[in-house]
Image (cartoon, rainbow, N blue to C red):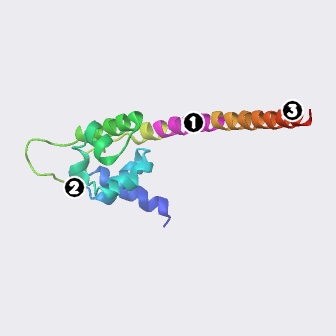
Amino acid sequence: RSQGARLKRILEDMLQRDPRTWDAFEVRYWLDFVGLSQHRYKFSHHAVDGRTLIKLTDEALYKLIGIHSLGQRRQLLECIGDLKECIDFSGSPPRERRGSAPPFDIKEHIARLQRDLDKARHRAGQQQRHLEEAKRRADLADKEVERVRKQ
């Protein structure tokens, strides 16, 4: 079986369970799913499991976890909010949610990830253009320095 099929099976299993039952590995996999895999190390370092994940606040993400990007903290909090909507907070312990609908609309997340990818490609193109312009200006400056030295 392919790695992708195995990971898809893990994700489907996770989304059928109460997020408070997730271990730290599953939280890191969820970060991949929501498009924030760059924070896997930080979450791993702080041993963030499902119970910890759903209690995270903006302040904790910033000060304790070290996520300084406001946009990424907001995106994380929005995704955590989606998870919380699927939890029964009546005081009962976490239970399996087999058979219930997963908390995410996979098509919506794929569309969101595609938009994020498109934005990243656009930013990369802009940065490439800025880099080329900086090189062009450096070349012009070098030529001007040579011209002045020859006088």
Sequence-wise first label, 3 or 2: 2
**Which residue is pictured at 20% across the width and 54% down the height?**
96
Quadrant of residue 82 in the image? top left
User: How far across and how far down the image is residue 134, in percent?
Assistant: 71, 35
Task: Tell whether position 119 is magenta.
Answer: yes
Sequence-wise first label, 1 or 3: 1
**Which residue is pictured at 70% across the width and 34% down the height?**
129
One can see residue 137 in this view: yes
Q: For mark 2, what is the residue?
A: 21
How far apart are labels 1 and 2 at the CA level? 34 Å
User: How far across and how far down the image is residue 148, in percent?
Assistant: 86, 32
**Which residue is pictured at 46% across the width and 36% down the height?**
112
Most extreme residue toward the right is 151
Q: In the drawing, what numbered circle is on residue 148?
A: 3
Name the image quarter holding the C terminus.
Answer: top right
Q: Secondary structure at mark 2?
A: helix
Q: Name which residue type carries label 2.
A: Thr
Q: For mark 1, what is the residue?
A: 118
- Whether tag 1 and tag 3 are in contact, CB under 8 A, the answer is no
Figure disc tally: 3
Which secondary structure dominates the residues rendered in magenta?
A: helix
Q: Name which residue type carries label 3.
A: Val
How far apart are labels 1 and 3 at the CA level? 45 Å
User: How far across and how far down the image is residue 135, in percent?
Assistant: 74, 38
- Whether tag 3 and tag 2 are in contact, CB under 8 A, the answer is no
| Foreground pick, 144 / 30 | 144
User: How far across and how far down the image is residue 76, in percent?
Assistant: 35, 40
Q: Find the magenta span and give its range.
A: 112-125
- Whether tag 1 and tag 2 are in contact, CB under 8 A, the answer is no
Q: Name which residue type carries label 1.
A: Asp
**Which residue is pictured at 40% across the width and 44% down the height?**
34
